[in-house]
Amino acid sequence: MRNFDRKRKRTWRYSWPRAAGRRGFTLMEVLIAMSVLAIAMVGFFSLFSQTVTVEEAARFNTVAPLLAQAAMADVVSGRAGTGGDFPDHPGYRWDLSITEVVPGVLGGDAVEGLAQVNVTVTLNNAERTYTLRAYDWLSSE
């Protein structure tokens, strides 16, 4: 079923026979369109996944320092223990570690009773961690 192109006498072109009046897409056109759509969707969903991960990290990096400062204030004032949960923030937990500063590091008796106080805030069993460090004088009591 070859059609003779009348504009060029020596050119032949082949066309698929179609029923009169029927128009539509070929199988190849549909497959190519679906492939392009699938590639675009994969890119979109990976971008969406990265956006969710960045949003979770941004939320932790905003909330954890505030919770650490609140826990440090409670530790310094003597109202807190050595760790616990934050009732208003599920999944967040804090722990306390106190290390006495070695007198030989800074020299002299000026560091007598000086301690390094670390408050560590974790999310979902140490999935993310933030540590606030301060130096304070230990009471001799």
Image (tube, rainbow, N blue to C red):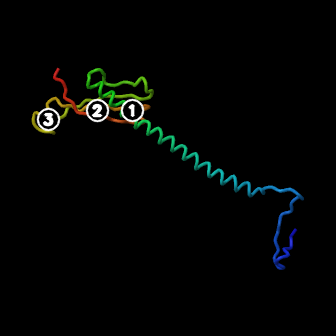
- Alpha carbon separation for disc pair 1 and 3: 31 Å
Mark 1 or mark 3, earlier in chain:
3
What residue is disc 2 on? Answer: 118
Identified by mark 1, the residue type is Thr
Q: CA distance from mark 3 to mark 2?
A: 19 Å
* Disc 2 residue crowd, few under 14, some 14–19, many 20+, Cα 10 Å: some
Q: Is residue 7 left or right of residue 35?
A: right
Q: Is residue 114 above or below residue 21?
A: above
Could you tell me which quadrant the C terminus lies in? Answer: top left
> Would you call the spot at circle 1 few (<14 residues within 10 Å), some (14-19), or many (20 or more)?
many
In the rendered structure, the answer to whether residue 19 lies left or right of residue 125 reads right
For residue 103, the mark is: 3
Query: Residue 119's quadrant in the figure?
Result: top left
**Residue toward you, 97 or 72:** 72
- Rounded to the nearest angstrom, the CA distance separating label 1 from label 2 is 13 Å
Secondary structure of the residue carrying tag 1 is strand
Q: Earlier in the sequence, mark 3 or mark 2?
A: 3
- CB-based contact (under 8 Å), mark 1 and mark 3: no
SS assignment at label 2? strand
Q: Are marks 3 and 2 in contact (CB under 8 Å)?
A: no
Q: Quadrant of residue 132?
A: top left
Residue 79 place in picture, x, y as percent: 29, 20
Task: Say few, some or many: other residues with alpha carbon within 10 Å of mark 3 (under 14 / 14 to 19 / 20 or more).
Answer: some
Residue at point 38% right, 33% down? 64
Q: Identify the amino acid type marked 3.
A: Pro
Residue of label 1: 122
